[in-house]
Amino acid sequence: MSELTTLILNFNLFSNFDVEEVAIISQYLSCYRFQDRQLLMKKGEVGNDLGIVLSGDVNILDGEVLIATRKPGEIVGEMALIRSSKRMADVVAASAGELAVMSFTNIERIKNEHPPIAVKLIVLLTESTLRKLQDTEKALQIERERLEFLLENIFPKSIVARLK
C-alpha cells in the first residue's frame, strides 16, 4: 500500500471507501508541495482540477477577505469538476504543506475504468459541495441579520425600510 493511500485512508472524507478503492483513487492523484503564502489556484482562471489537502492549511480568499480555511483531509476546487467555470476565489497556502490534485481528465478516466468508484467519488464531491454551499448560506444569513441590526440602530426606521 502506498504512502498516499495510507494517508488518505485516515481522512474522514474517505470513510465510505475501502482500501482497494482508495488505492485506485490514489493512482489518479498527483502530489505537489507548496510553501507558505503560495498561490495554489487563482481567482478568475478556469479550473478543471480539485485538490485534497494532505498537510498544511489552505485559505480561500476573495481579495483580502478570508472565506474559509481548509485543513488536511478537506477538498478545494471541487466545483470546477462539476462545471468547468472560472474560479470564484484565490486558494492560497496558509502554511507549507502538500496537496494531492486530481484533474477533470482523471475523473473521466476513473468513470471509464472504475465506474462504481467513480459514482462514490462523484457523490462525495457533490455532498462536499452542498455542505459548503449550506455553510456559506448560513454565514450570509448571519451577516444579513447583523447588517439589519446595525442599520436599525443607526438610522430611523423609515430610512431602513427604504434601504431594504
Image (tube, helix red, strand yellow):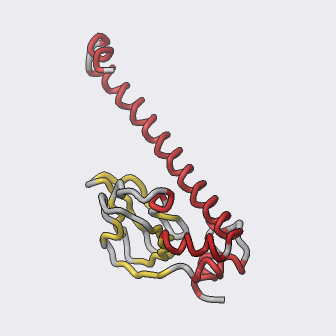
At x 38%, y 62%, the residue is 59
Please, is residue 132 above or below residue 55 in the view? above
Could you tell me residue 30's position as x and y percent? 48, 81
Left or right position of 54 against 66 = right
Q: Name the residue at 73% across, 74% down.
A: 18
| Left or right: residue 103 compared with residue 120 | left
Which residue lies most toward the top here? 158
Q: Nearer the viewer, residue 28 or 109?
A: 109
Which residue shows up at 29% across the image and 10% down it?
158
Query: Quick one: 12 or 46, which is closer to the camera?
Result: 46
Q: If the image is split into quadrants, where does the C terminus sit?
A: top left
Quadrant assignment for the N terminus: bottom right
Residue 146: horizontal and vertical position, in percent? 38, 31
Q: What is the x, y in percent for residue 106? A: 53, 75
Could you tell whether 40 is left or right of 102 in the image? left
In this rendering, does residue 141 appear at all? yes
Residue 45's quadrant in the figure? bottom left
63 to the left or right of 121:
left
The x and y percentages for residue 115 are 68, 70
In the image, farthest residue toward the front: 112
